Image: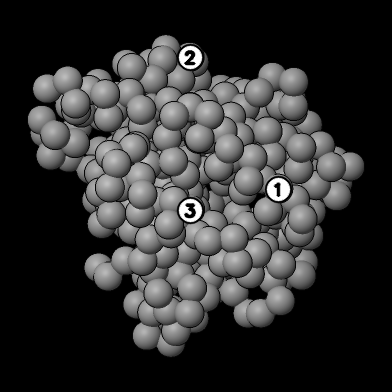
Amino acid sequence: MHLRYSEEVRRAREQGVPLVAQETSVVAQGLPYPDNIGAARACEEAVRRAGAVPAPIAVVDGEVWVGLEEAHMRRLAEGKERLLKLASRDLPVAIAQKATGGTTVSATCEVAAAAGIRVFATGGIGGVHRGVAEQLDISQDIWALTRFPVAVVCAGAKSVLDLPKTLEALETAAVPVLGVGTDELPSFYSRSSGLPLEHRVEDAASAAAICRARFETLGQGGILFTVPPPEETALPRAEVELHIASALAEADRQGIRGKAVTPFLLSEMARRTSGKTLRANLALLTNNARFAGQLAVAYAQGAAGR
């Protein structure tokens, strides 16, 4: 894969500074302007404070970038042009057509792996959608986690999904799911889901040791570290479920399908909660970036110590 690197990422690679991949669909499609660019900057700064360098990934005019210059990020955030939402399957189309777009979890995992980046920070992964029996809607994120050796730090799967089925799908795909300081799967806006996890870690050093065992000793695929959202902005699970049910019904009434569903639901949830879900989203993104930065540093230190 031919990759372009921002100046900051290029220097980090030359100097051996650990990198943290970041998706950009949250900027291009997930959050409104200017909250989107504010969130991107806050996440980048959280990674830097942890001692790593942020590497947001996107396709710009058909070129795959690892790390974005300021002008690139502004193009994604301001949305003054047609921007694609890029999963793994969309990458060849975007490259061939010289298009511009933000990467989702699956595409970010693929590009991060090609660049040798082992840690990736995001908000929540995709998974099995509600109503999957009527419409087989399962995110490419699960496939990507199976294939690419990247540690994905998130607040669980997006709460608008069928979380029990998503957890089962991850188990079937042999993707380890670990709680960071928790025995329960977080549910994005909420700290709990009622779904127990078999494994947990307490800190970045312990997480890094498991990454080394999976990536280096065993040569396996990705791994999921789930971090509960900050308590001060998290929402009660019962309240979130009520709003999700109403928002899903509205999406169905409007005939919204496929990739358009998640951005619509995020916007609708923010409206229905008077912005509380937006605040929770921004806080968990930064929280995840912070732990991802710590994990990248711990992983690099372990490699240097061998």
- Counting from the top left corner in percent of width and height, residue 5 is at 38, 61
Q: Residue 56 carries which label?
A: 3
Between circles 1 and 2, the one closer to the viewer is 1
Q: Could you tell me if the residues under marks 1 and 2 are in contact, i.e. CB atoms within 8 Å?
A: no
Q: Does 147 appear above or below 87?
A: above
- Mark 1 nearby-residue class (10 Å; few <14, some 14–19, many ≥20): some
Provide the residue designation for mark 2. Answer: 181
How would you rate the neighbour count of disc 2 (Cα within 10 Å): few for under 14, some for 14-19, many for 20 or more? few
- For mark 2, give the secondary structure: loop
Dot label at residue 38: 1
Camera-side residue: 38 or 240?
A: 38
Q: Earlier in the sequence, mark 1 or mark 2?
A: 1
- Disc 3 marks which amino acid? Pro
The answer to whether residue 273 is above or below residue 202 is below
Q: Where is residue 48 in the image (x, y as percent from the top left)?
A: 50, 35
Residue at the far bottom in the pictured view: 97
